[in-house]
Image (tube, grey):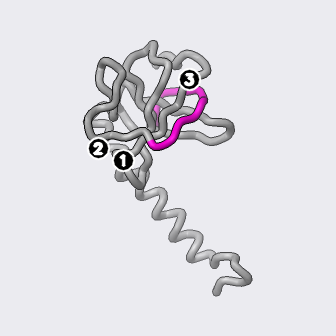
Amino acid sequence: MAETAGVPSYASAMKTFLTAVLLVACAAPAFAAMGGPVNANGSLKAGYTVTQRSRGNCFAGSIQSSASNSYRCMIGNNIIDPCYAASKSARVVYCPFPSSPRKVLQISLTGALPAQ
């Protein structure tokens, strides 16, 4: 099945989807062992850069990471997982990008972190 008027074929769409799934699956375990990109004092560990900022909330523990400071968060209707907090009372979380794990999204929380 070939592309038709800019619409990707099923095979092309599946390849893109599976690549994205693989990137997420491969990135998360590395962060689980490290506890994410944050120090206990709430700052980013050396080598990490905030490349985007937004506001949102976290509603559950991460399903991508087993780290105790990892969460599943939302910005609008978009779920971001994993995101990491420096403490249970943190007002921001940091979410690594699967394609560039040293670059993170900083989410300023609109509510408290959920109990885990």
Residue range of the region highlighted in magenta in the rendering: 51-63
- Which residue is farthest top? 89
Residue 109: give x, y in percent of width and height.
56, 23
Assign the N terminus to one quadrant of the image.
Answer: bottom right
Which residue position holds label 1?
Answer: 101
Residue 96: give x, y in percent of width and height.
41, 42
Amino acid on which the number 3 mark rests in the picture: Leu
- Which residue is farthest right? 5
Identify the residue shown where x is 28% and y is 32%.
Answer: 45
Amino acid on which the number 2 mark rests in the picture: Ala
27 lies left or right of 92: left
CA distance separating discs 2 and 3: 24 Å
Identify the residue shown where x is 48% and y is 24%.
Answer: 92
Asked if the residues shown at circle 2 and circle 1 are in contact, with their CB atoms under 8 angstroms apart, the answer is yes
Q: Disc number at residue 76?
A: none
Camera-near label (2 vs 3) is 3
Compare residues 12 and 6 and report the one nearer the observer. Answer: 6
110 lies left or right of 5: left
Asked if the residues shown at circle 1 and circle 3 are in contact, with their CB atoms under 8 angstroms apart, the answer is no
Q: Is residue 27 above or below residue 86?
A: below
Overall secondary structure of the magenta stretch?
strand
Q: Magenta includes 116?
A: no
Camera-near label (2 vs 1) is 1
Q: Disc number at residue 30?
A: 2
Residue 35: give x, y in percent of width and height.
30, 31
Secondary-structure class at tag 3: strand
Which residue position holds label 3?
Answer: 109
